[in-house]
Image (spheres, rainbow, N blue to C red):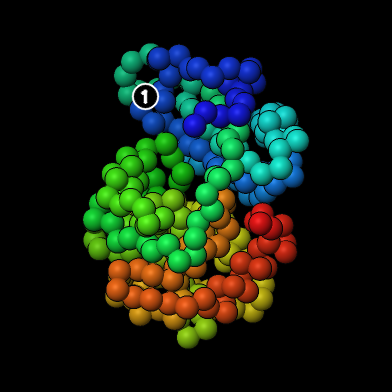
Amino acid sequence: MNPLASLVNGRAQTQMAVTSRLQYGDGLFETVAVHNGRLLLWSEHVRRLMAGMARLGLDSIDPTLLHAEAEALATGRGLAILKVVVVRGTKGRGYRPAAAATDRILTVWPWPNRPVDDLAPVFWCRTPLARQPLLAGLKHLNRLEQVLAQREFTDPYWEGLMQDTCGWVIEGTMTNLFVVEDGMLTTPILDQAGVAGVMRDQVIRRARESGMVVRQDNMTSARVMEADEVFLSNSVIGVRPVLRLAERLWRHGPITSRIAQTLRACGDAPAL
């Protein structure tokens, strides 16, 4: 699949120099849902992107410029996915960077033409996530762990859950994890590994606004399997229930359904 359109540092092109620090994964990315030309949760994506750039020491980007470029690609799109990539601008060989303007790559992609079936099962991945607090929470470009994990499963599985090297359940390969226990919502702590998703933050916010207790805690696989409800989230799917994981089966849960409806009603997720 090819992008529908792309901008590299504001110019309509599809190529980067072979000396780009993409070769080291030295950057960050955001995946933004586009619905009727609107960039969903754009402010939240930019806030996370800027915070990540500060942590990695990338030169800042003008958010107004970034928004103008994103809107240019999103205008007129019914449903699409915008990917924003920022890369440290130093060219050449070697790990040590020198100061340079950050490269930015924006691409717009077709919306997935095959929606995820709620009945599709979820897989327990064997590939572990490394614990690295300096990178924990960031949506950085080093995604080899997720690549290896996704190679473990094929259809009908649509997603796989990953644990860290200490055995704590952290997230899906492309989603964040939530469980419902006695009416309370719990999501794994992400201080050692994992991506702090924009939609994850919205789920926490909307659930608390509704009066729910939301906790962040270390999560075992047994605890996931014993939960009353389990669901996954990201900026494209919004919220998706887990109805089958290994031998465990769940029914559509009321809390998962309510949160999904709230996100759509608030414009956080596409009303598909």
Residue farthest bottom in this picture: 182
Tell me what residue is drawn at x 41 percent, y 55 percent: 158
Q: 196 or 256, which is in the foreground?
A: 256
Asked whether the viewer can see residue 206, the reply is no
Q: In this view, does 156 lie above or below 207?
A: above
User: Label 1, on which residue?
Assistant: 23
Tell me what residue is drawn at x 48 percent, y 17 percent: 16
Query: Quadrant location of residue 267?
Result: bottom right
Q: Is residue 181 shown left or right of residue 201?
A: left
Q: 21 or 147, which is in the foreground?
A: 147
Q: Where is residue 174 in the image (x, y as percent from the top left)?
A: 44, 51
Q: What residue type is labelled 1?
A: Gln
Q: How many labels does the image show?
A: 1
Q: Position of residue 81 (x, y in %)?
A: 60, 41
Asked whether the viewer can see residue 28, the reply is yes
Q: Is residue 11 above or below residue 266?
A: above
Tell me what residue is drawn at x 48 percent, y 28 percent: 87
Q: Position of residue 19 (x, y in %)?
A: 40, 15
Q: Where is residue 36 in the image (x, y as percent from the top left)?
A: 74, 45
Asked which secondary structure carries label 1, the reply is helix
Q: 225 or 246, which is in the foreground?
A: 246
Q: Is residue 109 above or below residue 157?
A: above
Crowd rating for badge 1 (residues with CA inside 10 Å; few <14, some 14–19, many 20+): few
Q: Is residue 148 above or below residue 115?
A: above
